[in-house]
Image: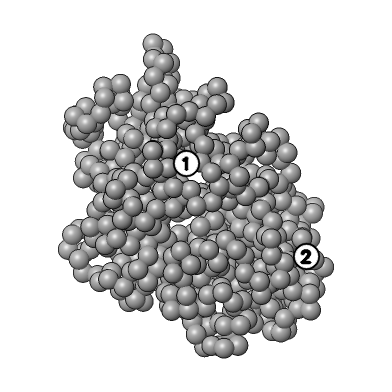
Amino acid sequence: MAHISVTAAENPERPAIIMGNSGEVVTYKQLDERSNQGAHLFRSLGLQNGDHIGMMVENCRQFLEIVQAALRSGIIFTPISTHLRSDETRYILDNCNAKLFIGSKKLATVAGELHGELPQIQHYFMLNGADAGFESWDEVTATMPTTPIADESMGTPMLYSSGTTGQPKGVLAKSPVTDIHETHPNLAAFAAIFGFNESTRYLSPAPLYHAAPMHYNNMLLGVGGTTVVMEKFDAERALQLIQEQKVTHSQWVPIMFIRMLKLPEATRQKYDCSSMQVAIHAAAPCPIEIKEKMIDWWGEVIFEYYSGSEGSGMTIIDSASWLTHKGSVGPAISGELHIVGEDGEEVATGETGTIYIGNGNPFEYYNEPEKTAGAYNKKGWSTLGDVGYVDEDGFLYLTDRKNFMIISGGVNIYPQEIENLLINHEQVADVAVFGIPNEEFGEEVKAVVQPVSMDQAGDELSQQLLEWCKERLATFKVPRSVDFMEQLPRMENGKLYKRHLADAYRDGKS
C-alpha cells in the first residue's frame, strides 16, 4: 500500500474518485493537492496534531478530500450522520471537543442552528456556498498551498455509535501508525483478504459518514484504485454503475440486497454484473434466503463480516464457507469469540448468549469512562451487546441485539428471526418487529410492515402475513398484529432505528 501522494506522483491522472450520478472525476493529483490545501488550512487556523474537528457532509468528493486532509495532518475527525437533528449533532460536537465544524449548503438548516452554540468551536465552514457566519471551505482552501505541510502525521477518525440505545458514544481507537507513509496493519490485512489493488474499481453505495464505507474508501485510495461513490443509493442505478464502471469490488448492507432483489426480474437481468469479484456486506444480519438469492445471481463473490466501530474483533466468511454454514458470519480472524450467559459465565457450544471478544483490540468511548467500563467484563472481554452462538466449527451466528429481545410469558423471542421471515414475502419491502406491553404476558410481538405498495395495506394483507408466519414459526413467535407504514425509519447506512419506533408505540403515539 502507498499514500495517495505516491500514486499522485506516479499516476497523476488516474481517477481516484468518480461521483456516481454527476460523473464528476477527481484525479489522484487533484486529491493530493486538495488534501494538502486542507491540511494547510488546518495549520493556518492553529489546529495541531491531536485536535478534533466535526463534519456533517453528504456524499460528495469534498468529503473524501477533507478526510485525506485530516489523515495527513494528525487531526482526529468525526463524520456525523446527515440525518441527525441539531440537538443530536450539538451533543456529538460538544462531546468530541471539536474546534472546527464543516457543514454543507445542502444541510444548511442544521448547520445554521449550530452556529455560535458551542464556544469551543472556533471556526465554521460550509461546502458549495456559505451562509451567514460560515466561511466557504471551497474558496478558502483554494488559496492554500498545494504542497505538503512540514509536519505531516497520521490522523484518525473518531466515529460515533448510531445512538439506537441512548446517547451516541465516540469510539476512539488510536492508530498504531504515525507516519503517513506507513500502512496501518488492519488496512493492509483487509486489502490482502479482499484483493484490493491499483486495478480495483470499488462501488461505494452507502453514506460515507458510516464506518465501513469510510474505512473501505480510505483502504481503496491507499492502494491506488478508483472509487465510484453514489450520492445516494438507488437499486437500479447501482446495477447500472456496476456495468458502466466495470466495478470489481463493492460494500453493501442487507437492505440494499433486498432492494435490488425486489426489482422486476427484467430490470435485474438488463445489467451485466460479471465484473464483480468481491461484494462485501455487514452492518446487520442478512436473511438466509436473501443471501442465497444474491449468490445465485452474482456467484460466490459475497463476503460477510461481523465487527463494529469499536474494532475490538472481527469475523469473516466467504460464500463457499457460508454455503456450508448458512446464517453464519464466520470464525474470528481478530480476537477470540466467547458466548456469555446471564450469570456472566461462558455457555456451552451451540447455546445462545451475549457475544464477547477476548484478546481484541482495546478501545475507549471518548470522555465516557463508565460506558467504556460497561463494555468490558471482569475477564477483560468486550461486547457490543449483540446476541448469538458459536457452532462446533467455531463459526459465529448472530441472533439479535440484547436490547431488542422480547420477553413474552417468560420466553425469549428474537425479532430478527421474524423480520428475516417477513422480508421474504413478496408484498413486504421492509419490516420491523419489536415488543409492546401486554398485561397478561408482559410483552407481545408487534410487526410494522412497509408494503411494496401502500395500496395493498389493510386487513387482507395483514391476515396474509400472519398466516405466512403461522405456517413457518412457533406459535409464540407469531406477531399478535401487523401495522403498516409508508416508510420505516431506516437510515441510508442500512440501520433500522427500531428503538424510536418501538418507543412511539409504547408511548401510545402510533
- Residue on which disc 2 sits: 49
Task: From this view, report whether residue 388 is shown above or below residue 182.
Answer: above
Quick check: 321 left or right of 200? left
Depth check: 278 or 346 in front?
346
Quadrant hosting residue 69: bottom right
Give the total number of marks visible in the rendering: 2
- Can see residue 85? no
Bin the neighbour count of mark 2 within 10 Å (Cα to Cα): few under 14, some 14-19, many 20 and up: some
User: For the residue labelled by badge 1, is the local secondary structure a helix, a strand or a loop?
Assistant: loop
* Residue in view at x 58 percent, y 51 percent: 311
Task: From this view, report whether residue 97 is shown above or below residue 5.
Answer: above
Q: Quadrant of the N terminus?
A: bottom right
* Residue in view at x 63 percent, y 81 percent: 5
Q: Which numbered mark, 1 or 2, is in the foreground of this view? A: 2
Residue 353 locus on image (x, y percent): 47, 30
Quick check: 297 left or right of 197? left
Q: Amino acid at mark 1?
A: Tyr
* Residue in view at x 72 percent, y 67 percent: 178
- Can see residue 20? yes
Q: Quadrant of the C terminus?
A: top left
Quick check: 50 left or right of 335? right
Q: Which mark is residue 497?
A: 1
Residue 78 locus on image (x, y percent): 65, 57
User: For the residue labelled by badge 2, is the local secondary structure a helix, a strand or a loop?
Assistant: loop
Residue 31 locus on image (x, y percent): 59, 79
Bin the neighbour count of mark 1 within 10 Å (Cα to Cα): few under 14, some 14-19, many 20 and up: some
Residue 386 locus on image (x, y percent): 49, 37
Quick check: 190 left or right of 414? right
Question: Tags 1 and 2 in contact by the CB under 8 Å rule?
Answer: no
Quadrant hosting residue 348: top left
* Residue in view at x 17 percent, y 63 percent: 266
